[in-house]
Amino acid sequence: MYDLLLAPRWSPYLVGAGIGLLIIVSFVLSNRPLGASTAYAKAGGIISRLAYPQTDAMDYYRKVTPTVDWQLMILPGIVIGALLSAHLSGTLALEVVPPFWEARIGGGVVLRWVVGVVGGILLGFGARWAGGCTSGHGISGNLQLSLASMLASAGFFIGGILVSLALFGVPSDLGLWGFL
């Protein structure tokens, strides 16, 4: 079992089963689905309260109270877990510009960070606009057989594939159909 945790890549079947069990626990203990984008909105609300005490009067924050709860604590847990996993497997590499980006786009740090920040803002906006992110729709919503989540997940995959193709092209050894 310990060797499994030290592997550079985990079995997608075991990880999927683990996420499925985590969602069951989430529903049983809190009657709420697993998701990350709402937690970011809660964090934004908590920060907003510091400068704007009327934050709680906003329509969105009447429905989603900006509090520190288990959903918000998942965010640092994801980061800590990813760093711990990479460290234990010996694959931790703190890179400002990943090699695949440098090979295709170039080694410019500023461009990499600008694209990362703009992409993150667009992802956050899209996730809130869609009413959930890849974990909220793609995992929790599909688990509940939500048609909206199925459509959102299809959109996430199509968008991800198109952006990947635009940024990095099609690997020459795969061809377009081998890539998809």
Image: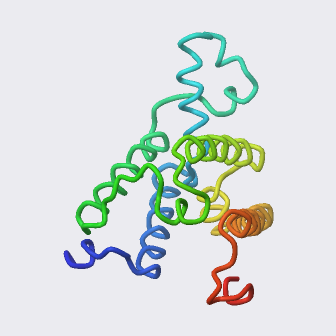
Quadrant hosting residue 179: bottom right
Eyeballing the image, is 120 above or below 66? below
Place of residue 110 in the rendered image (x, y in percent of width and height, measured from the top left): 56, 40
Q: Nearer the viewer, residue 30 or 118?
A: 118
Q: Residue at x 56, y 28 (%)?
A: 66
Place of residue 27 in the rendered image (x, y in percent of width and height, measured from the top left): 53, 57
Place of residue 37 in the rendered image (x, y in percent of width and height, measured from the top left): 61, 45
Eyeballing the image, is 52 above or below 116? above
Q: Residue at x 57, y 33 (%)?
A: 42
Quadrant hosting residue 51: top right
Quadrant hosting residue 4: bottom left
Image quadrant holding the N terminus, namely bottom left
Q: Residue furthest left?
A: 2
Place of residue 125 in the rendered image (x, y in percent of width and height, measured from the top left): 72, 41
Q: Is 130 on the left or on the right of 79, as rendered?
A: right
Q: Residue at x 62, y 89 (%)?
A: 173
Number of numbered discs present?
0
Q: Is 143 on the left or on the right of 145, as rendered?
A: left
Eyeballing the image, is 80 above or below 10? above
Q: How is the image coloured?
A: rainbow
Image quadrant holding the C terminus, namely bottom right
Eyeballing the image, is 16 above or below 137? below
Q: Is 34 on the left or on the right of 93, as rendered?
A: right
Q: Is 152 on the left or on the right of 88, as rendered?
A: right
Q: Residue at x 35, y 52 (%)?
A: 94
